[in-house]
Amino acid sequence: MAVNEQTMEQVRQWMEAHREELIRDVRRIVEIPSVSEEGGEYPYGEGCAKALEELLTMGREYGFQIANHQYRCGSIRLPGKEGAGELGLWGHLDVVLEGEGWVHPPYACTEQAGFLIGRGVQDNKGPTIADLYAMRCIRELGLPMEHSIRLVAGCCEETGMDDVVWYGENFPLPDYSIVTDTAFPVCHGEKGILELELLSPPLTGLRAASGGVASNVVPDRAFAVLDSFPEGTSLPKGVSLRRENDRVRLEAEGFTAHAASPEGGVDAIARLCHALSLGAPDWEMFRFLGDACEGFYGDFLGIACQDEASGRLTCVGSLISLEKGRLRVTFNIRYPVTEEPGWMVSKVERLCEDHGFSCRVKSLDPPNYVEKDAPFVTALTEVYRQVMGLSEDEGEPYVMGGGTYARKLPSAIAFGPGAPMNFAPLGLPAGHGNCHAPDEAQSIDNLLRAAEIYVLSLLELDVLPPEEDSEK
């Protein structure tokens, strides 16, 4: 069904008229550091609790029904007609650690050259505010809706998605859900996510080692402290050495990226381990880890594969630490939707055994996949094409390596204003601007256009039969 052109223009004008308010509200939420963490008074930490309270305050200010679901999630609701069902918008307020190397303050939400810069502007606070503005637009313009609309904002998406699992166990789920946490156009599938943890035997002369900020981030920094290292060793690019207090410290720098799309990133753990293999005791162990972390497609581990629907497997050595003399390294693997993870685990276990390491499955999250021609996918694709002025051959649905709430919900797909974007006007260093990177940035125009797309998508879904009643 084509979107009414008059309605589309009406929505676009409303969004532009509320541009400064949207910027203000994104800033209100980005200025609150909200890395999900365990322990304390709240299930995911004080920062996430404060961010949730601020979002719910906005919802109340704009006249919506609000609910705080034990600080795990919050919801903002626009009622529809009784018995008509519900449509869902899903976002999250937790963010990854800011890391190092920022040009702009990570929690100041700097406005520059038509962009907002700060941790969460892209993933996922900015899009969550776009959801709220879609609901505001529908309410304030009086656009006709049968279904109620509920925005659910979670607080531990980056650290396991227990929040949305809990919500689904305790509350009814919408007829259709749009997860606004990816890049347009429609993402109709997500690769499986497998985390493996490798543990070395006790190592000689290694006093400390650390690298990475989260499993789903290509690490841009890593270091190791040793008792000794040969003088005059030629170190790999990005690795430096200094001697202090009769010990040696090696530091490696790389380029960060999201583990779902690591192209363009450089793994600092790989660089560090290759450097250690040049002169540290137990150099064979470091050579093995360096080769395993080198590249992003699992070739060395013997698990490289791909399929037509979702493309290549990706594999990132993302975290390293030293515990009681043993190195612990986490690998974040995104595998194609048609593959089974069992053979990959067996392959890596055998390879690790050959090199003196143990291997265990740290977590496993199966893929999510909705057929490309499903009515839900088709409806959102048509809206996107019409708003963006695209032909029927453009804006094709796709499958990605990222993981969103869509994999935890029925009748859900991801559809959002993420990268790629042209960050050239910001003059940022290489590797900056993207999701999970330093100086994370989001185009203000992108957010306004996303909110417009969500309004029109909700209008279309309002007249779409529930999935079980639609033709497959």
Image (tube, grey):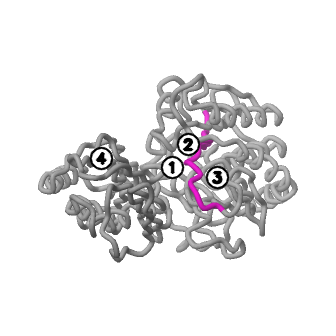
Give the answer, above or below, for where 189 lies relative to 390. Answer: above
Give the answer, above or below, for where 66 lies relative to 400. Answer: above
Q: Secondary structure at mark 4?
A: strand
| Label 1 – label 2 distance at C-alpha | 7 Å
Three-letter code, disc 2: Ser
Question: Is residue 60 visible from the viewing direction of this image?
Answer: yes
Which is more N-terminal, label 2 or label 1?
2
* Pointer 2 residue: 177
* Pointer 3 residue: 119
Which is more N-terminal, label 4 or label 1?
4
Three-letter code, disc 3: Arg
Give the residue at x 45% y 48%. 471
Give, as a single range, the part of the protein colored magenta.
86-102
> Is-magenta flag for residue 99?
yes
Q: Secondary structure at mark 3?
A: loop
Which is more N-terminal, label 4 or label 2?
2
